[in-house]
Image (cartoon, rainbow, N blue to C red):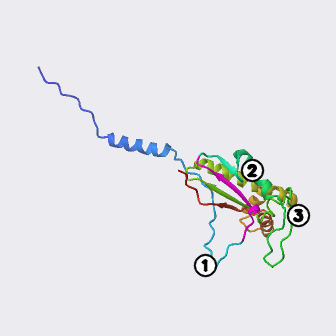
């Protein structure tokens, strides 16, 4: 009886198939990209620099603990209520603003629509929002808080830009960017709104809770 040959599998093209599969998965797989917030870091002050004295009422304290709970001015608050609280603080207009670069004294905020409370911020250019998180705070919660604060500034800038120039600040800024930043008139308008409501958000060193 003749011996039957055992058939063999032709593995010559297996490497090519594996390589093609690898390319396929690389092309079709989506990569998660970490989100972040653009921040401009301040320059290191000179050795003889003396920080200005800041009134406590001009600081809006926002704290996020390790349980992702939000404390605003020492009181528990839902993140959904943060934007309105920030608007109320920034737009209070209870005093006078910073002196001008030419030495002119500070003046009251004639465009603010707040309560003008003596216990809240004097002027938008003096209003500082201080955000402090815990090392155990979830990154997503921190991003939510920052977004709500940025929305507060956007609301105020849009309102003022609509009053002064008949268009929202977001539209004004987009038109300026679309002009390749060459339109001087648009530039002046954008700077005017940004100066009226400067975005002053300070990130304090995170705390460590045991």
Marks 1/3: CA–CA distance: 37 Å
Disc 3: which residue: 110
Name the N-terminal-most of marks 1 and 3: 1
127 over 147 or under it: above or below: below
* Circle 1: element type: loop
125 over 37 or under it: above or below: below
47 over 186 or under it: above or below: below
* Circle 2: element type: helix
> Dot 1, how many residues are within 10 Å of its Cα: few (below 14), some (14-19), or many (20+)?
few
Across and down, in percent, residue 186 comes to: 79, 65
Mark 1 vs mark 2: in front: 1
Name the N-terminal-most of marks 1 and 2: 1
Quarter occupied by the N terminus = top left
Name the N-terminal-most of marks 2 and 3: 2
Disc 2: which residue: 83
For image coordinates 75% across by 56% down, the residue present is: 153
Across and down, in percent, residue 88 comes to: 80, 54
Residue 61 part of the magenta-drawn span: yes
* Circle 3: element type: loop
Does the CB distance between marks 1 and 2 fall below 8 Å? no
> Dot 3, how many residues are within 10 Å of its Cα: few (below 14), some (14-19), or many (20+)?
few
Magenta region: 53-66
Disc 1: which residue: 47
Across and down, in percent, residue 57 comes to: 76, 61
From the viewer's side, name the closer residue of 151 and 187.
151
From the viewer's side, name the closer residue of 109 and 198.
109
């Amino acid at each position: 009886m003749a011996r039957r040959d055992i058939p063999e599998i032709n593995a010559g093209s297996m490497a090519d198939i594996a390589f093609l599969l690898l390319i396929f998965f690389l092309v079709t797989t989506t990569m998660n990209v970490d989100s972040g917030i653009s921040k401009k870091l301040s320059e290191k002050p000179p050795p003889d620099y003396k920080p200005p004295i800041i009134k406590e009422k001009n600081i809006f304290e926002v704290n996020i603990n390790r349980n992702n709970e939000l404390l605003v001015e020492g009181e528990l608050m839902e993140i959904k209520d943060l934007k309105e609280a920030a608007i109320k603080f920034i737009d209070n207009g209870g005093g006078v603003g910073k002196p001008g670069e030419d030495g002119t004294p500070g003046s009251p905020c004639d465009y603010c629509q707040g309560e003008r409370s003596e216990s809240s911020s004097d002027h938008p250019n003096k209003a500082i929002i201080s955000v402090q998180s815990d090392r155990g705070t979830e990154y997503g919660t921190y991003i939510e808080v920052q977004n709500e604060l940025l929305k507060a500034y956007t609301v105020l800038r849009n309102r003022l830009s609509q009053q002064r120039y008949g268009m929202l600040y977001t539209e004004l800024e987009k038109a300026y960017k679309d002009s390749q930043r060459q339109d001087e008139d648009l530039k002046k308008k954008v700077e005017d709104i940004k100066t009226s409501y400067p975005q002053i958000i300070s990130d304090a060193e995170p705390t460590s809770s045991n």
